[in-house]
Amino acid sequence: MRLSQVLYRAASFAMHRLTAWNTRGEGVHSPYLFYIVRMLLYDTNSYYAWKSIEQQRNAMLHTSKLVHTNDYGTGCSGEKKVQDIARTSLCSMREGQIYFRLVNFLSQQYNNKHSNEPLTILELGTSLGISTAYLAMPDARNQVITMDGSHDIIEVAKQNWQQLGIENVTCVEANIDDSLADTLINIAHAHVSLALIDANHTREATLHYFDQIAKYVRDDSIVIMDDIHHSREMNEAWQQIKHRDDVTATMDLYDCGVIFFDHHYLKKHYKLRL
């Protein structure tokens, strides 16, 4: 990581800590969003699946196997140790738990609102499959489609899912920039209930991904954008997405941003300190 990026991230973290709220939901106007903040983001209860997922992460952190990687964002390809990928590229435990809680909550909402309709979850950037596990394990009826362009990485992810007993994941092995549109067409009959964008960390690619996904969301869909403060480019993309007409509320959690589309909400952007 370049020094300029290190300095930028340190400054952005300090600014977030100074300006973010820690109100546990106070000041959040929508009852639905208040519940998400109060009962999900600040929840301290554990779920049975978390321990097994973190055991797989720990195994990856101690795996020295070399795998070939394709980074379509930087144009770089080469070999890396699995443990190095696990150390630098996986979602944090806290982020994964947030994903799990959001999926679990949405599953319950859809059961009540849409006659037991399962979720269609889209993940851009599979990596070693740890974030995918957090998305897939809350409800085995949900369909999780995850996309990545590195064959070796996907094979490691599949082994992790097998160890965890996960059977509701479909993996699309392709350059996301070229294949996202076709993938969305294939799942358009269901729409996208929740999407996690964690792939090419450039402004143009991120906006392109969001533009395409936004065509397939409905009012109760959620999009999570990872690494919104990773770089100036990613922050610029986040700021542009926040002010789109179809986005009605956002939550900046520093590590990621959560995006809502229900036009019953007041247009408001929350910056939260967890």
Image (cartoon, rainbow, N blue to C red):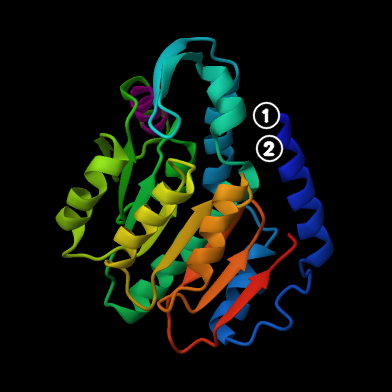
Q: Quadrant of residue 141?
A: bottom left
Q: Residue at x 43, y 41 (%)?
A: 199
Tell me how far mark 2 sits from mark 1, CA to CA. 5 Å
Contact, CB < 8 Å: mark 2 with mark 1? yes
Please determine whether, in this image, residue 46 is positioned above or below residue 261. Answer: above
Q: Please give the residue where the numbered disc 1 appears in the rendered image.
A: 2
The percent coordinates of residue 239 (x first, y second) are 56, 64
Give whichever of 77, 60 is nearer the camera.
77
Q: Is residue 252 left or right of residue 106?
A: right
The percent coordinates of residue 77 (x first, y second) are 41, 19
Residue type at numbered disc 1: Arg
Helix, strand or loop under label 1: loop
**Can residue 181 be seen from the camera position used here?**
yes
Give whichever of 107, 196 is nearer the camera.
196
The quadrant of the image that shows the C terminus is bottom right
Q: Which mark is residue 10?
A: none
Question: Dot 1: few (<14), some (14–19), or many (≥20) neighbours within 10 Å?
Answer: few
Q: Which residues are magenta?
A: 153-161
Residue type at numbered disc 2: Gln
Q: Main secondary structure of the magenta part?
A: helix
